């Protein structure tokens, strides 16, 4: 972030970007998906606030805390809903929209919600973005748009998408080359070869202590392995139409999918 500021990058929240007819160049859309470890998100938001940077924080129902979200909003950050309603409703689109509306209303009792972003829900065979395949749109919920509709993701813009998923930025920047480490990101900013970025950083993947420095990579490795396993099973399900209900693989996936340390609406 300091390197970006030193090289005159303008920062945008997701909502600010959608509301800007002509974004500055160079610029960065900064987004954080708060999947877990809310304390890390608090630390990240405080650092950005100290630097004068506004970012977008998308909270799941399991990570949303009214006081924390309100504090972030007061700091200048955007707060959004990280929805996973289709997965929670096991593919029932109507039920997903009802759950989405209920949770959105609950969030809006405490903060302004202008944009939303789907959660990956890797243990579910249902893609949460698929709930929008019917006639309904974000505008029906008084939303500006969804985070994935930023032009960088649909191939209509030169804006390059950086994501820390898998603990590897894993992107190729034209004129610069492959970007894998955070040091590579810094060198990219300094090079001037990437004028428009969309950065997604998950607070739970970053460390705020020596323990997390060791624990985070180990947890992420286990999580990515589990995602690969689940993804393979879901591909089989989508190909064949269904998986046998009593197979150990399906039973394990469904058990993991329904398990939650906190009760969610």
Image: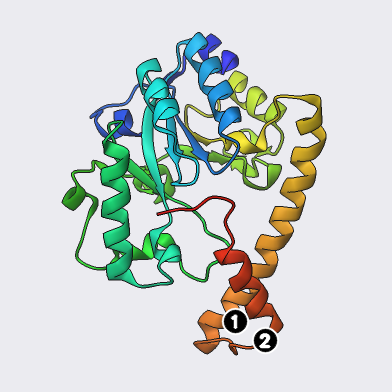
Residue at image location 31% in from the left, 67% down from the top: 95
| Image disc number at residue 74 | none
Residue 172 in view of the camera: yes
Q: On the picture, is 127 further left or further right than 110?
A: right
**Gap between marks 2 and 1 measured at Cα:** 13 Å
Q: Is residue 248 shown left or right of residue 210?
A: left
The percent coordinates of residue 200 (x first, y second) are: 52, 37
Res 16 quadrant in image: top left
Colour pattern: rainbow
Q: Residue at x 31, y 33 (%)?
A: 15
Tell which tag, 2 or 1, sits nearer the viewer. 2
Question: Element under label 1?
Answer: helix
> Tag on residue 247?
2
Is there CB contact under 8 Å for labels 2 and 1? Answer: no
Q: Which residue is located at x 67 percent, y 73 percent?
A: 252
From the image, tell me which residue sits under label 1: 236
Pick the quarter of the image with the N terminus: top right
Residue at screen point 49% across, 87% down: 241
């Amino acid at each position: 972030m300091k390197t970006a500021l030193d090289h005159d990058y303008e920062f945008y929240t997701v909502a600010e970007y959608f509301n800007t007819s002509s974004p500055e160049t160079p610029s960065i859309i900064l987004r954080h998906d708060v999947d877990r470890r809310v304390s890390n998100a608090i630390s990240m938001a405080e650092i950005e606030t100290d630097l004068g940077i506004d970012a977008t924080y998308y909270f799941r129902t399991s990570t949303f805390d009214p006081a924390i979200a309100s504090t972030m909003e007061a700091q200048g950050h955007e707060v959004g809903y990280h929805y996973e309603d289709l997965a929670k409703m096991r593919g029932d689109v109507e039920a997903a929209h009802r759950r989405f509306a209920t949770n959105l209303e609950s969030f809006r009792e405490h903060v302004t919600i202008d944009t939303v972003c789907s959660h990956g829900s890797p243990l579910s065979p249902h893609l949460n973005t698929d709930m929008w395949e019917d006639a309904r749109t974000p505008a029906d919920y008084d939303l500006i748009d969804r985070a994935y509709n930023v032009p960088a993701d649909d191939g209509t813009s030169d804006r390059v998408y950086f994501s820390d998923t898998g603990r590897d930025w894993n992107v190729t920047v034209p004129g610069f080359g492959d970007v894998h480490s955070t040091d590579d990101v810094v060198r990219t900013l300094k090079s001037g070869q990437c004028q428009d970025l969309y950065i997604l950083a998950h607070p739970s993947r970053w460390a705020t202590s020596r323990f997390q420095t060791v624990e985070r990579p180990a947890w992420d490795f286990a999580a990515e392995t589990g995602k690969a396993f689940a993804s393979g099973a879901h591909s089989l399900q989508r190909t064949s139409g269904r998986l046998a209900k009593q197979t150990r693989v399906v039973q394990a996936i469904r058990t993991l999918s329904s398990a939650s340390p906190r009760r969610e609406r």
